[in-house]
Amino acid sequence: MAPFRFSDSIDAFHARASEARGLGDFGDDDYREALGVLCRSLDEDARLTPVGEIAHQAMIVDALEARLLCEEGWRRHPEAGEAEIERPLVIIGLPRTGTTALHHLIAQDPEIQAFEHWLMRTPKPRPPRSEWDADPDYQAALARVDMMFARSPEMRAIHEIEAFLPDECWNVFSQNFTHGSYQANADVHGYAEWRAKADLRPVYARHRRNAQLVGSASPEKRWLFKDATHLYGADALLDVYPDACVVQTHRDPVPMIASVCSLCWASRSAMNEGTDIHAFGRDTLALWGESIDRMMAAREGRDPSQFYDLPFERFVKDPAAAIQDVYAHFDLPYTDEADAAIRRFRAENPKGKHGQHRYTLDEYGLDEGEVRERFQRYTDAYAEVGALPLEADAANA
């Protein structure tokens, strides 16, 4: 039997998505170049296991289904175009710098809305919470999360994902097939080279389109977005959301790189054959070094008040107080209801709830010196706000 080829299956992927949803409008064709490049790179560069091959096919079809649902949602709800997205809170930070915990906590504010995992994958106007359990898309999301953790059980202790919780914006970027998770999941160097030069403004324009649709039922609530890959596309983000209130988290890059290597390897190892773990470590260091360089360039010349720099150590020490500081900086109301909800979620979801996450640099062929050298410009620039070596207990929190 001839090996499966992603490049020869693009029409079939579209057909599978259309059959699954009974829809045929995928919207603008601005995603097709990225999809073609990705499929060629999966064919030519990656060495996927059978599990990885099936998983990547599912990722592609799921993204196409999301495009169909977004277009159908706009057809049925043209009023979504009237939804304003003013001064959204955007959490940007290198991976493993507390962004997920910060995201989940701020999202507890009843005056805030965020992209729940299931609605990123199946966009529609957000139904009332009481209706979610009866929604087949929500049930499918629950099953998908369970399957992911069954495939890579160590992931649950590393990165919290639940169908009902807010998730990262790359899930929406997948509709354009232009985001860094493909590089995390497989050796797709050809795709990575293409993405480094890609125009990301259409990606963020579609992100906004999804936010308008999902949030059309509660347009009065402020939006909250979060993703480490916003670092990579910060200029495009700020073009599409020029009044964004940006919270940038900071952490010593040495434990950060070790931690993100561990996170991505937990997923990648089940889906790829013969991956050189040391080459993977070097690629991961290069990717996030480039990302922080892009973010620093995007901040040059912009109003400093548009940004709030939050040290990891400060957030870990007192999350609620750190969030109050964020709100104060952007002159946002921090209510008693928000404080109570944030503290309650924190108490119900303590750190280490799903086990401890342990990691070292040397298993990925990296050492502290080369990580510090790659991030020297960043740590020098943000020394005063906490991008420095931390005490051991805080650095491994």
Image: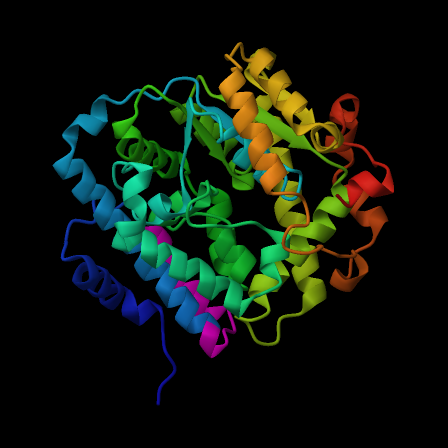
Q: Where does the magenta region start and end?
A: 32-51
Quadrant of the image occupied by residue 97:
top right
Q: Position of residue 174 (x, y in %)?
A: 39, 49
In the rendered view, tell whether residue 110 sits above or below residue 290. Answer: above
In this figure, what is the number of numbered marks? 0
Say whether residue 388 is left or right of residue 260.
right
Residue at figure coordinates x 77%, y 63% from the top left: 363
Quadrant of the image occupied by residue 74:
top left
Q: Residue furthest bottom?
A: 1
Q: Position of residue 7 (x, y in %)?
A: 34, 68
Residue at figure coordinates x 37%, y 55% from the top left: 141
In the rendered view, tell whether residue 41 sits above or below residue 295. Answer: below
Secondary structure that dominates the magenta span: helix
Q: Position of residue 397 (x, y in %)?
A: 75, 43
Quadrant of the image occupied by residue 24:
bottom left
Say whether residue 335 is left or right of residue 23.
right
Q: Nearer the viewer, residue 71 or 167?
A: 167
Q: Nearer the viewer, residue 292 or 197?
A: 292
Say whether residue 196 is left or right of residue 22.
right
- Give the quadrant of the N terminus: bottom left
- Is there any visible trace of residue 28 in the rendered image? no
- Is there any visible trace of residue 30 in the rendered image? yes
Q: Position of residue 92 (x, y in %)?
A: 57, 32
Q: Residue furthest top?
A: 331
Q: Nearer the viewer, residue 91 or 185?
A: 91
Residue at figure coordinates x 40%, y 41% from the top left: 116
Residue at figure coordinates x 46%, y 78% from the top left: 50
**Colour style of the rendered protein structure:** rainbow
Magenta includes 21? no
Magenta includes 33? yes
